[in-house]
Amino acid sequence: MIVLKMINITGKNVYDISPNTTELVLQWATKYDAYENEEQPWFISYDGEEWESATEEEYTEREASSDDYTELEYIPLSEAN
């Protein structure tokens, strides 16, 4: 019998628009990766490439901070008939 253990890898990237441009700049990213470290699977990055270990509290604080950013509504430029 073969048993496969499924391990979740989830995350979030938060971007900001660079002043006077249309370029998006990564502010911070989080990931939950039990495959990389089963005992402490919480990570934070500021460049999207290098990941630092974080505590569960730091991770949860970042994930719960949706009040710190604005979700943009979709507004069509024109109505197609």
Image: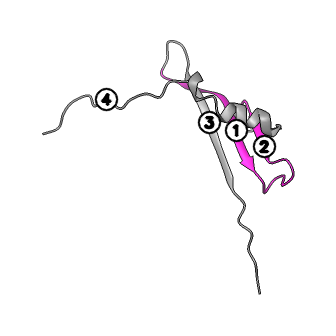
x, y percent for residue 54: 82, 37
Q: Residue furthest right?
A: 39
Image location of residue 37, percent across then percent down? 84, 52
- Which disc, if any, is residue 75? 4
Q: Which residue is mark 2?
A: 42
Q: Residue at x 49, y 17 (%)?
A: 21
**Can residue 40 be seen in this snapshot?**
yes
Tell me which numbered mark, 3 or 2, is placed earlier along the sequence.
Answer: 3
Residue in view at x 75 percent, y 51 percent = 33
The N terminus lies in which quarter of the figure? bottom right
Q: CA distance from mark 3 to mark 4?
A: 23 Å
Q: Residues within 10 Å of mark 1 (few under 14, many from 20)?
A: many
The amino acid type, in three-letter code, at marker 2 is: Trp
Location of residue 10 in the rendering, given as x and y in whole percent from the top left corner: 66, 49
Report helix, strand or loop for mark 4: loop
Position of 40 relative to 45 (above/below)? below
Q: Is residue 77 magenta?
A: no
The extreme bottom residue here reads 1
**Is 26 on the left-hand or right-hand side of 57?**
left
Mark with earlier residue (4, 1): 1
- What whole-number distance in Å separates the C-alpha atoms at marks 4 and 2? 35 Å
Q: Is residue 50 among what the camera can see?
A: no
Q: Marks 1 and 2: CB-CB under 8 Å?
A: yes
Tell me the magenta residue range. Answer: 22-47
- Any mark on residue 30, and which? 1
Please give the label number shown on residue 13.
3
Identify which amino acid the numbered label 1 is placed on: Thr
Determine whether the residue tagged by mark 3 lies in a helix, strand or loop.
strand
What secondary structure is marked by label 1? strand
Asked if 37 appears above or below 70 in the picture, the reply is below
